Image (cartoon, rainbow, N blue to C red):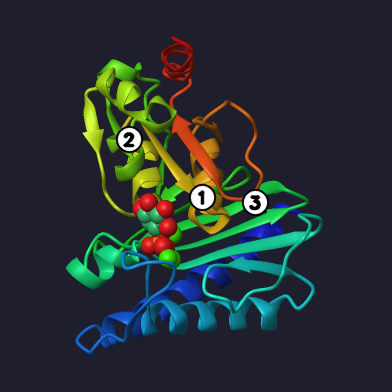
Amino acid sequence: MDLAEIKVINTQVQNWLATAVNELRQNLDEQLQVRTKSGRNDLVTNFDKGTEHFLVEQIHHAFPEDQIVSEEGFGDRVQSLQGRVWFVDPIDGTMNFVRQRDDFAMMIALYEDGQNVLGYILDVMQDELLWGGPSVGLHVNQQKITGPANQPLAAGLLGVNGPMFALNREHVRDIAFASSGARIIGSAGLEFQRVIRGRQVGYISHLAPWDVAAGKILAETAGLSVTTIDGHPLNMLESQVVLVITRRALPEVQKIRQS
Ligand code: IPD
Ligand code: CA
Ligand code: CA
Ligand code: CA
C-alpha cells in the first residue's frame, strides 16, 4: 500500500471511531446488559457487541476482500495473515467499563502480509486517540508525538497482569521489583499507551491478538521492543505472554528471567 492509500484509510478509520464513540457516549446512562463468558471476571456487554458489530460492518463494507480478527464473534475465522488483516477490540477493559465507566479503550489495527500498517488506541473517557504506524508516525489526536526516552528498568513503572504478578509467573514479580514499581490498569491498550508515552518503562501480560495488535504497531513505531516474554516475534493469530519494553530494559529483563 502506498502512503496516499494509507492516508485515505486513516481518515475512514478515524471517522468510524468518532461515530462509535459518540454512540457509546450518548447511551452511557443506559442500563448495561452484562453477561459472563469464561468465568465471573470475563464480561461482555451490549456495548462491546454493538461497537464491534458497527466497526466490523464498516470495514467489511469498505474493504470486502479484507479479513477481520475480533473478540466478540462478528469477525472472520482468520487462518492466515496473508493480505490485509484487521484486528478489532471494541472495548478493551470491559471490567473497568462495567465497574468504573473509565479506563477503557476502543482499538483497531491494520496489518498487510503480517506487517504493521496502522494502529489506533482510543481512550474513550479522556477523548484521546493514539494513532499511527511506520509510514505516518505517531500522533495523539491532531498532535504529532515522538517515542519515549530509552529508560533502564529501574527508572520506570512496569505494567503487569494481576494474576501473573501475584503468582510470579514468568518471573513477573521479580522483574517488577527491579523496576520503580508495579502497576495494574486493567486495559492492555491503555498499558501500551502509557509505555508509548513514557509513563511506564514496560508492560507484561498474557494477551489475545486483538489485545495487542494496535499496541504492537504503535509501540514499534515508537522505537520500543514488542516480543513474547521469551524474546520471540509475536504470532498474531494466537494468545501469548507479551512483553513491551524499552530497548535498554530488554536485556535487563532477560537477565532476571535467566537468573
Ligand atoms: C482485557 C484487558 C485486560 C487484560 C486481559 C484482556 P478485554 O481485555 O485488556 O487488561 O489483562 O487479558 O482480556 O477483555 O477487557 O477486552
Ligand atoms: Ca473480553
Ligand atoms: Ca482486550
Ligand atoms: Ca474487549
**Helix, strand or loop status at disc 2:** loop
Marks 3 and 2: CB-CB under 8 Å?
A: no
Where residue 153 appears, x then y in whole percent?
Answer: 33, 19
Image quadrant holding the N terminus, namely bottom right
**Vertical order, 125 against 47 (above or below):** above
Label 3 within 8 A of ligand 3 by Cβ: no
Can residue 137 be spotted in the picture? no
Which numbered disc covers residue 117?
3
Tell me how far mark 1 sits from mark 3, CA to CA.
14 Å
Tell me how far mark 3 sits from mark 2, CA to CA.
36 Å
Q: Is residue 141 left or right of residue 162?
A: right
Q: Which residue is mark 1?
A: 212
- Mark closer to the chain start, 2 or 1: 2
Residue at 63%, 58% (x, y): give it.
110
Q: Which residue is mark 2?
A: 167
**Vertical order, 124 against 23 (above or below):** above
Residue 149, quarter of the rendered image: top left
Which numbered disc covers residue 144?
none
- Mark closer to the chain start, 3 or 2: 3
Q: Is residue 162 left or right of residue 231?
A: left
Which class describes the residues within 10 Å of circle 1: few (<14), some (14-19), or many (20+)? many
Residue 166, quarter of the rendered image: top left
Q: Amino acid at mark 3?
A: Val
Marks 2 and 1: CB-CB under 8 Å?
A: no
Q: Amino acid at mark 1?
A: Val
Identify which residue, 137 or 103, lies in the foreground: 103
Where residue 257 appears, x then y in whole percent?
Answer: 45, 18
Which class describes the residues within 10 Å of circle 3: few (<14), some (14-19), or many (20+)? many
Where residue 233 appears, x then y in whole percent?
Answer: 65, 34
Q: Amino acid at mark 2?
A: Leu
